[in-house]
Amino acid sequence: MSTLKPLASQGKGKVAAILPDTVTSTRYVEFDAPYITKALTLAGLSSSDIIVQNAQGSDTTQFTDAQSDITNGATVLLVDPLDPGVGARIEAYAKSHGVATIDYDRLTLGGSRSYYVSFDNVLVGKTMGQGMVTCLAALIPNDENAAPIITYLKTHGIKAKTFPTTGQDATLTGLQNILTGYQCGTVYKPIYLEAEGATALAMYLRAGKTPPASLVNGATQDTTSHVSVPSILETPIWVTPANMDSTVIKDKFVPAAQLCTGAAAAGCKAAGIS
C-alpha cells in the first residue's frame, strides 16, 4: 500500500466506501471497514479524506450516504450495493457528478462502475466442489448453513467424520466444526486482499490515472448492461486443519484464543494451533 503514496499527492477529494448492512454478514463491521480504512491510510490518505459507512440494510440510507459523500467532496466511491437497483442509482448519480465508482464485493447489474473488486466466485464454487469430492459428502453453501445441519445430526447421535460437509466464509463455528471432525473444510476469503485491491484502484482513479494492466487480473460480465467489467478477482483458499494455522490464524481472521475452546481445543492441539 505504501507504494501508492505518490498517487495521494496527485489526486484530490475523498474516497468513500459504502457498505450494505450488518445482517447478511458480520464481515462488513469486523473486517471490511477496518481493512479499507487501514489500506487507504497506508496509501497516504489522511483520516479527513476517508469515509467508511454502513447503510444498515436501507436502500434509502445507502443512496443518501452516496449523495452526502459527493456533496462533501468524495471523488471516488466504493459501492457494495444492497441490491442492483440502489447500486445502479448510486452509480448513475455519481457519474452525473463526475465521481468515479468501483463495485466492491458485489457486482451492480445494470451499473456504470469503472471496475469491480471481489473474489473469483467461480473459483470459490470449484474449490468447494473439490472439497466435496474429497469429503465424499454433501455440498452445503456456507458455514452458517452447515452449522444447524451439523447440530441436528449431533442430536441424533451421528459421530464425527461420518458425514463430512463443506462450507465457505471461514466462520468461527465452521472452523470449530472442522477441528472437531463435523465439517471437512471451508473456503476462506482473505478480505484484506479485497480491501487492498479496491484501495489501489481508488487511488489511481482519484489521481485521474488509468490503473496498470498488471493490477486488473480479470473481467466480469454484467448480464444486465451486457458489458464486460474490468475486475480484480482475488483467490480463495480451501482451509482444513492442515493449513488453518498458516491462513486464518496467521491473518488474524479468527483469534486462536476464541477458536481453541471447548471441544475444538483438542483439534487445535493436533493441528499445532496455539
Image (cartoon, grey):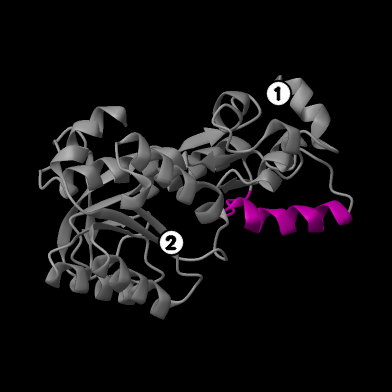
What number is the disc on residue 91? none
Q: Is residue 252 above or below residue 13?
A: above
Residue bearing the label numbered 2: 53
Classify mark 1: helix, strand or loop.
loop
Q: Residue furthest top?
A: 272
Residue at left offset 69%, top offset 42%: 183
Specify the segment rendered in magenta. Answer: 138-155
Which quadrant of the rendered structure holds the N terminus?
top left
Q: Is residue 215 above or below residue 34?
A: above
Q: Is residue 274 above or below residue 200?
A: above
What number is the disc on residue 273? 1
Which of the pair 181/265 is nearer the observer? Answer: 265
Which quadrant of the rendered structure holds the C terminus?
top right
The residues bearing labels 1 and 2 have C-alpha atoms spaced at a distance of 35 Å
Does residue 180 appear in the picture of this structure? yes
| Residue 248 point in image, percent of width and height | 58, 33
Classify mark 2: helix, strand or loop.
strand
